[in-house]
Image: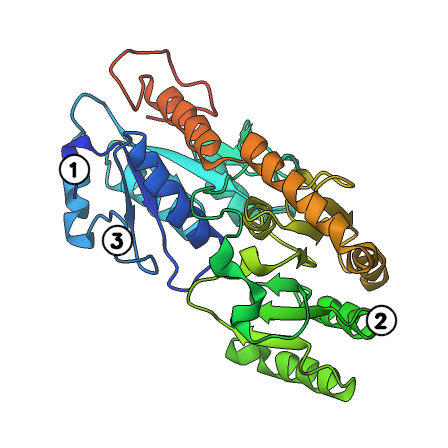
Amino acid sequence: MQSLSDIRVIAPHFKRRLSGVTSTLVQLIPEQRRRGLGIVTLGPGLPPGMPALSWAALPRLWKRPQGASHRIWHARRNNEMLAGIVLKHVLRMPLKLLFTSAAQRHHTGYTRWLIARMDGVVATSARSGSFLKVPHRVIRHGVDTALFHPPGPQDALEGTGLPGRYLIGCFGRVRHQKGTDLFVQAMIALLPRYPEWTAVISGRVTAEHTGFADDLKRRIKAAGLDSRIVFLGEVDDIKPWYRRLTLYVAPSRNEGFGLTPLEAMASQTAVVASDAGAYAEQIAPGETGAVVPAGDGGALRQALEPYLADPALAEQHGRRGLDHVRQHFALAREAEALEEVYSSLLGQPVIGQTVIGQPVIGKSRA
């Protein structure tokens, strides 16, 4: 691992299970390191290859990094903010605290208390920023267009053993919040009229949502569509499945930011999504896909049907979606914007040596 004296940013990850934050860090941190930023993670639940600070090395954070007065503690969850507050204000470690908020709701009093003690705050969308009561900067997540890319010959549908010529998919944890039932309802209504299409659902079914998933499977079987609405389970690598799709659906009832539409568009796949999270800020309606009100199954079905009736339209919007992501949501744009925030908080660039000014984001409590 890079010497701790060269580390400028620590990105804690205090959750073992895969989440949207996990997906963000897995893509973003390698990009940040490629750009020359000294950054490590701390905590469980990330792939072995990620650069990580061990818990045993935590006391070494009392020593200032080489050439800088502080490090950045970049939290994305309440428990990570709390840990940063303890490290800085109780243990007196030289840290600047940054929080990225993706929440699409009013914060609790406890969360507001934590946020008020941050030195800087980032919102992942204009909508999430509207719920913040402190100065902040909007930096939308990006996607790695090298990892998520258009299909090649190896991504042909024929190799999957699934019927039909076109795939429509819905990925993510199978539960009410994610709107999996809305997708299934739409497929039960539409697929009998469009025999060339097959639907796939991929994602984890946790114990508390097993009954929900089992009910969906019963409804699919009762409709005689169990060979055309297929549960893939939790696949090892979802990227090829994005490339096999002609249309991706993100029907969440509520969401934080939500990366899957960007991953789909980077794979040259058109997207129909709810307006949960930042989905509406990601999609160009009528060009790269469509956006419908969250929780409205009828609107979802109506938005999907034109694509099933005209696969060429989906393919056209998929090509435009690829251009859209490359122009507006490339991962490098997110990394560059965060570098500006880090540099502002530290009063000097995190990459290079020239001082660029004093902190301007939030209030400094060093």
Q: Which mark is residue 219?
A: none
Question: Which label lies toward us, 2 or 3?
Answer: 2
Q: Position of residue 35 (x, y in %)?
A: 32, 30
Apparent side of residue 109 relative to residue 246 in the rendered image (left or right): left
Q: Which residue is mark 1?
A: 4
Quarter-wise, where is residue 73 in the image? top left
Question: Which label lies toward us, 2 or 1?
Answer: 2
Q: Position of residue 76 (x, y in %)?
A: 44, 45
Q: Which mark is residue 193?
A: 2
The answer to which of marks 2 and 1 sits earlier in the sequence is: 1
Q: Position of residue 26 (x, y in %)?
A: 38, 49
Q: Position of residue 142 (x, y in %)?
A: 50, 39
Q: CA distance from mark 1 to mark 3?
A: 17 Å
The local secondary structure at tag 2 comes to: helix
Q: Is residue 113 visible?
A: yes
Cβ atoms under marks 2 and 1 closer than 8 Å: no
Q: Which residue is mark 3?
A: 49
The answer to which of marks 1 and 3 sits earlier in the sequence is: 1
Residue beneath the point at 43% across and 34% down:
118
Three-letter code, disc 2: Arg
Apparent side of residue 243 relative to residue 281 in the rendered image (left or right): left
The answer to which of marks 2 and 3 sits earlier in the sequence is: 3
Badge 1 crowding class, 10 Å Cα cut-off, few under 14, some 14 to 19, many 20 or more, is: some
